[in-house]
Amino acid sequence: MKKISWLIVSVSIFSLSSLSAQTQKTKPSAKTFPAEVARPKLVIGLVVDQMRWDYLYRYYNRYSNGGFKRLINEGFSLENTFIPYTPTYTAVGHTTIYTGSVPAIHGIIGNDWYNVETKKNIYCTEDSSVVTIGSTPSSEGNMSPKNLLATTITDELRLATNFKGKVIGISLKDRGSILPAGHAANAAYWYQGSTGNWITSSYYMKEVPTWIADYNKLKLANKFYAKNWETLYPINTYLNSTSDEKDYEGKTSTFPHTLAQNIDKNFDAIRSTPYGNTITLDLAKLAILSEDLGQDNITDFLAISCSSTDYVGHAYGPNSIEAEDTYLRLDKDFEEFFNYLDKKVGKGNYTVFLSADHGVAHVPAFMKENKLPAGIVSDRDIVFKLNAFLNNKFKVNNVVLKSMNNQIIFDHDKTDNGTVSFDVIKAASIEFLKRIDGFTNVIDISRIAQTTLPEVQKKMITNGYNARRSGDLYYILDPNWFNGSSTGTTHGSWNPYDAHIPLVFMGWGIKPGASNKTHYMTDIAPTLAALLHIQMPNGCVGEPITEITNK
Ligand SMILES: [Zn+2]
């Protein structure tokens, strides 16, 4: 009996398959389409503040298998990704990654800019109409995305899911949390250095959820201060870095860095240690757990920025043991974080991307010590010298207001009403500035189309120029020259060390691989939009990167 029924079943399967093979020859069979749009449960944005592309490989041999190495080998790395505008600063980078737009359109032209009408500096996320939530009121909480003119990919996810997909931003820096999370975020949390609490503002909510309030009671910074900062491995194994006692390092102390003196006194100090990244990723894990991120079929988005790499990088430079140790420790933190995601959201259920808001230059004194060209200029000095020159030549007093973000800003009340035309003042200023050591070129931004300039610089300055918020002249300095002091280093230029950033996608929808094709920071948001099948942000100028997907 059993044998007979098996025979019947086999025969029917055979007849069905041969029948379908025959039908296919004559006309195509009805295709089975997916019943629903496939999406990951969670998208994780990891922006590592000040991470140069070469750091993926500079420390590769010492990375663990589960952190950066996992990203590179399990994910798809876009090895030639560039920032398409200048100046290359933190707020601008975070905004561009998430809007797929450029400062000319999204309006975030720097961390600060100068408002020529009010004659006041504006901080990118300042908003005096909102207050601190989650801690003692302070100006650290008067923050919102109100100066951001475009939508972010996170806003678009909120719109596409009818505000059901959750969006949360987390970073030590307000700008690293608020700008990626966008306008319609459920929350953005950042670190209040004066108290050691994670805070938000009344833009987002009336009170912080219990999980944040409880977490703040732990005063986690103290626990890390008690450990001090010693190198992860014996210090004599840090062969990628210069010795630890250079007087051009911005902070004087050497390993071990004692931190215990900060307990209950200086909560801000954790920023300039690798532990700042550890507490950021720790809070991110708690957010996933407490807010049930990635637990249903509506995609959520967690935008994380690790800022301690930037504080450490500014102080000690790319060739320091401090920078190397910070990346080795971040690698361990990432390993733990990815393991947590595997466990909590499930491997293959989430998509993660890693990138950076900008890179960094070597410390000029380190370059000179090694016979490499470099130098520094001073914004204050530039304003002083240019005003003296213009006063002497045209009898105009203090017509230059500012030198900031590589731009010269004139007092338009004086340039518009004076006896000398503004064009004459600008032309004379350009000739004067070009004679100063370290200046490569000075451009009248409103006339950039008529200026003889390498195409890449022309494009980057144009993209960075916002007609209402930017200055009048733009100056390009020689490679590895910047506005700064004799210690430490910075970023902001058009040069590859500042503009060449890592970009790696991993997880749901992504195949392993690497490409040396040129891509731009503005391509990240449209790539995510394509992956999620949602509308791209409303100021987007980038293009989806197609080679990374497994379809
Ligand atoms: Zn930055």
Image (cartoon, helix red, strand yellow):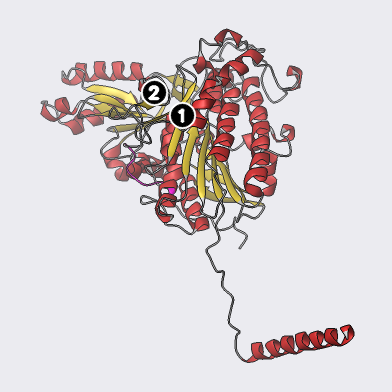
Rendered view: 26 above or below 363: below
What element does badge 1 sit on? strand
Q: Where residue 138 appears, x then y in whole percent?
A: 36, 20
Rendered view: 183 above or below 157: above
Q: Residues within 10 Å of mark 1 (few under 14, many from 20)?
A: many
Q: Nearer the viewer, residue 113 or 460?
A: 113
Residue at the location (68% across, 37% down)? Answer: 335
Answer yes or no: is residue 308 visible.
yes
Question: Is residue 150 magenta-colored?
Answer: yes
In the orientation shown, which residue stands out farthest toward the top?
A: 261
Answer yes or no: is residue 52 visible.
no
What element does badge 2 sit on? helix
Rendered view: 292 above or below 436: below
Q: Quadrant of residue 254?
A: top right
Indicate the quadrant containing the N terminus: top left, top right, bottom left or bottom right. bottom right
By secondary structure, the bulk of the magenta-drawn segment is best described as: loop
Amino acid marked by disc 2: Glu
| Distance between the alpha carbons at the discs numbered 2 and 1 | 9 Å
The magenta stretch is: 147-153
Q: Where residue 368 appears, x then y in whole percent?
A: 56, 19
Q: Nearer the viewer, residue 522 or 528?
A: 528
* N-terminal label among 2 and 1: 2
Amino acid marked by disc 1: Trp
Any mark on residue 190, and which?
A: 1
Badge 2 vs badge 1, beta-carbon distance below 8 Å: yes
Q: Nearer the viewer, residue 254 or 345?
A: 345
Question: Is residue 303 magenta-colored?
Answer: no
Q: Where residue 135 appears, x then y in whole percent?
A: 42, 22
Q: Where residue 279 appears, x then y in whole percent?
A: 57, 27
Looking at the rendered structure, the number of numbered marks drawn on it comes to 2
**Residue position for label 2:** 140
